[in-house]
Amino acid sequence: MADVVAIGEEHAAGGLNIHPMDQFIIYPLFGDGGVGMFTVTNATLWMAIIVLCVVLLLITGMRGRNVVPSRAQSIAELAYGFVYKMIEDVSGKEGLRYFPYIMTLFMFITLANFLALIPASFSVTAHIAVTAVLALAVFVTVTVLGFVKNGASFLGLFWVSSAPLVLRPILAVIELISYFVRPVSHSIRLAGNIMAGHAVLKVFAGFAGALGLFAFIPVLAITAIYALEVLVAFIQAYVFTILTCVYLKDALHPHH
């Protein structure tokens, strides 16, 4: 915490000195020591808040199951139907067995992205350490599932039987490389988009604080970017989830 305060004092002393990446600093909530494996940090706190919000929305919101739904019940029902339809369309009926896992991913990422838009909050999905764990969990799950369901025939995912025979070994290598790159692209896409949006907001906020009477110019830009970030928050959760469904489809039906 002392390091964070020192950084803030250094920036204040420098006048117009905008540091948009400071908002992503992870620090311990208790004490001034370093961040270790089991340190309770601001990221830990916000992930706990996200999980609590998911529980409140899906469990508490659906408790009554009213004929005329409340706002919470309406949101929960819309989210349920949206993810259910996505899995059914992309992965097929067989993929619906894994609905709870995919629904959990979607709700966690969606609420993490939206809660991060609250002023003075913390964006956990802007950190590659978080998104990489989510992406690796998907990668390991679908890979294990692919071998459990299909055995050695799961390797048919890498063999493009519709291509000319001479090209199949080359395409197999390309397919193999692209398969192992999946968790990298899966995680970086989410973290990169969220981090970039928040950094841009912080830059324009810094300009607004320094321009005095002309602060309305960056404020207008912040308003437009904030509206865009609301859209991005949902789109990035959707992209992460639909890619998970695509990878699940490959595990269930690996043959080209």
Image: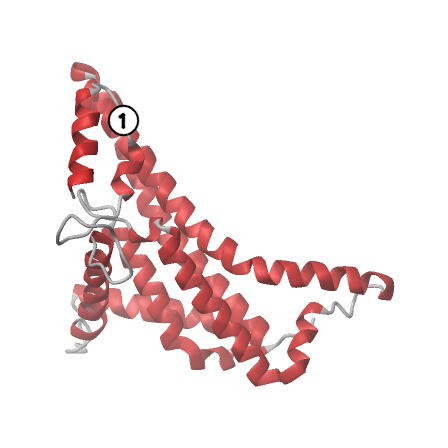
Horizontal arrangement in the rendering, residue 207 relative to residue 89 (left or right): left
Horizontal arrangement in the rendering, residue 166 relative to residue 230 (left or right): right
Residue furthest to the top: 213
Position in image of residue 115 (x %, y %): 23, 52
Point 45% across, 56% down: residue: 239
Residue 84 in which image quadrant: bottom left
Horizontal arrangement in the rendering, residue 226 relative to residue 102 (left or right): left
Q: What crowding class fits label 1: few (fewer than 14 Cα within 10 Å), some (14-19), or many (20 or more)? A: some
In the image, residue 3 above or below residue 165:
above
Q: Is residue 255 at all visible to an observer of this figure? A: no
Residue furthest to the front: 33
In the image, residue 128 above or below residue 56:
above
Q: Is residue 29 at all visible to an observer of this figure? A: yes
Q: How is the image coloured?
A: secondary structure
Towards the viewer: 235 or 35:
35
Point 15% across, 48% down: residue: 32
Position in image of residue 101 (x %, y %): 38, 74
To which residue does mark 1 refer?
A: 18
Towards the viewer: 172 or 65:
172
Point 19% across, 50% down: residue: 33
